Image: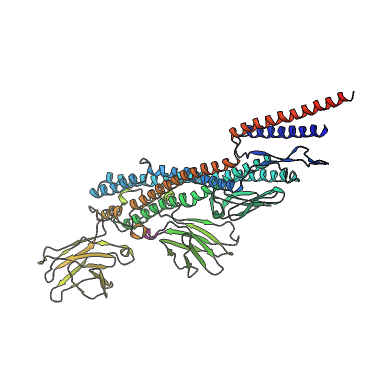
Amino acid sequence: MSSLLSIGKSGLLAAQTGLATTGHNITNSNVTGYNRQVVVQGTTPPLQTGDGFVGTGTEVAQIKRVYDDFLNRQLLGAQTNQSQLDTYFNQVSQIDNLLADTTVGLSPALQDFFKGVQNANSSPQSPAARQALLSSAQSLASRFNGISARMKELQQGVNTGVAASVNEINSFARRIADLNNTIAGLSVDPSALPSDLMDQRDALIAEMNKQVKVTVMPAENNMLNVSFGTGQPLVVGNRSQVLATANSPSDPERIVVGYQTNGNFSQLPDSVLIGGQLGGLIDFRNSGLDVANASLGKVAAGLADAFNDQHKLGLDLNSQFGGNFFNDIHAYVGYDNRNAPTSTVKVDATIVDAAALTTSDYDINYNGTDFIVTRASDGATTTIAPYPQAQPQVIDGVAFSITGAAGGPDHFLVRPTYNAAQDISVALKDPNKIALAAPISTSVPTTNTGNGKISPGAVNANYLLPGNQLAAPVTLTYNSGTNQLSGFPAGSPVDVTVNGTTTTYPAGTPVPYTAGAQIAFQGIEVSLSGTPANNDKFTIAPGSGVGDARNGVLLAGLQSKNILDGGHATFQGSYAQMVNFVGNKTREVQIASSAADTAVVQAQAARDSVSGVNLDEEAANLLRYQQAYQASGKVIQVANTLFDTLLSLNQ
C-alpha cells in the first residue's frame, strides 16, 4: 500500500507543480521579456521485485525556461537599430522643418538682400535706398544668426540626450551585475536555475540595448558579460564599468563619452558608440547636425567674403574705397586642454577665399618640428612652412596664422564654417560708405575720327595694391601704321587676352590692337572694339563715386554668380543643396525607420512563437494538470480503500 500511496503522492506533487507553473505563465503573459516555463517530468527509480521492476511514481526533473538565444539576439539587433533610427529621425526632422519654414528660411532673406542692392543701384544717390540696403543686410545677418541659434539648441539637446543615455546605461549595468551575482549564487544545481531572475536580467539587457548596441557573452556560473562597440566592456561578471560624459578637450560645447576610472576620464571614439538612442544621437550630430551647420556657415562665410572683396573695389559717396561691408569671419579655434602648460601657441584662421571653402574641420598638430594641418574629411595634410611664418598660409580658402612657441605635442581644432552663420554681422553703419561706384571711368574724345569704342572698365584686387591706383588719367593712342596702342603706364606690364589666350607685354612697350581683346594692367580691365583711326585716343580716368552704380551692379551680380564649391554653386544654390541634403536624409531615415519597425515586429513574433506565453495552450495545460491531479488523488483514495480492507481482514 505504501508504494501505491507514494506513487499517488508523487503524481499529486508533479501535477501541483504543473498547475503552479502554468498559473505562473498565465499571470506573467503580459510581462515584457518573460520566457514561458515548462515542467519536465521524469520517472523515479523503479523497485525490483521477484516479478520484475515495479514503478515508484514520478518526479519533476526540471522547471525549464524556454529560451532561444539565436532568436533573442535577432530581436536585440532589430530593437537597437530601431531605437537608433527613431532617435536620428526625431532629431533630423527638426532641422528639416526649420529649413522648410518660409518664415525662418534663408532663401527669402537672400532674395530681399540682393533686391536691396538692385534698388540702391537704381538710385545710387538716394539715402533712403542706401539705408534700405543696410536694413536688408541686417535682416539677412539676423536670419543666419537665428537659424544658427536653433541649431545650437539642437546641439545642446544632443548633449543633454547623450548625458541622460549614459546615466541609463550605467544604471542598467549596475543592476545587471547585481543580478549576475545573485544568479551565480543560486546556480549550484545546473538543472534548477532561477528562471525569473534570468528573465529580469535579459529584460535589463534589452533596455540597455535600446540605449547602445550591446554584445552578450556567457560567463561562468550562468553569468553574462556585456560589451558594446568593438568590445568595450560594460559588465564583466558581477562588476560593472562606469561610463561618463565630459566636454570635448578642444570644443567645450560638445559632450563626449568615456570611461570614468579612479577619478580619471578616458575618452572613447565616437565610432564605438553605435546603435540605440546614444548611437542615434552621436550619428545625428556627426552626419546630420554638423554637416548642416557647416554648410549653412559656408554660405554665410562665402557671402561675407565675396561681397567684401567686391565692395572694397568700389567707391563710396565720399570717393573713398569701400571697406568691409560684413565683418570678417574668423574660424572657430579649439585649444586642446591637454596641451602643455608651457605652450604659448596662438592660432588664428580667417576666411579669405569663398570659392575654395569646404565644410571640413581641420586638426593642427605639432610634431616637435612642424605644425601639420590635417583636413578631417579626407586626411589630406599640409605642413605650415616655414615656421615661424612670414605671412599666413592659405589652405582651402582659410588663412592660417600660427604664432608662439609649442610646449609639446600641441593639438588644435579649427572649424572654419561651423560658427560662421552665428558670427556673420554687418560692419557698415553709415549708408554713405556703401561703395556702389566704380573707381575708374572710361571715355572716347569727340575728336576721334574712327568708330573705336572702349568698355566702361572694371578693376580687380590688384588695383588695391600700392601704386596701382590711378592718380591721373591714362590716355591710350592708336597708331594705324603699326596697329598698336601706346600710352600705358611706364612701370606696368600689359596682359592682352584674345580668345582665351593671354599674352603679356613688357612695361613701356606698345601693344598690338585686336578688336574685342581684353586688356589688363595695374588691376584695370578694359576692352576695345571697332575700327579706330590713326591717333584716336581712349581715356581711362579715376572715378568720382558720385552718380555711378557700376560696382553696385557687380555686387548685385554676385547673387547669380557661381562662387562657392570651387566656382560651381551660387549662394542660393549652395543653400538649396543643404536643404536638399537634410530633406533627403530625413526621408532616408524615415524609410529605414519604418523598415526597422517591421523587422522588430517580425523578430518579436519569431521570439514569442518559441518563448512567449500562449494563453490557449496554457488553458489546455491547466485542464491537463487538473485531471492529473484528480487522477493522482484517486490513486491515493484507492490505496486508502485497499488499506482499510486489509485492516478489516485481520479482525
Looking at the picture, how far across and down is residue 82, in whole percent? 51, 45
Query: On screen, 88 above or below 625?
Result: below
Is 536 contained in the magenta span? Answer: no
Q: In the image, what residue occupies the spot 43% across and 54% down? A: 417
Taking the image as shown, residue 615 lies to the left or right of residue 311, namely right
* The C terminus: image quadrant: top right
Q: In front: 161, or 537?
A: 161
Looking at the picture, how far across and down is residue 162, in whole percent? 56, 46
* The N terminus: image quadrant: top right
Q: In front: 75, or 50?
A: 50
Q: In front: 191, or 551?
A: 191
Looking at the picture, how far across and down is residue 77, in whole percent? 55, 48
Note whether residue 181 is visible. yes
Q: Given the current orientation, which residue lies at the most extreme front position? A: 51
Residues in magenta, as a range: 351-358
Is 354 contained in the magenta span? Answer: yes
Looking at the picture, how far across and down is residue 603, in whole percent? 54, 44
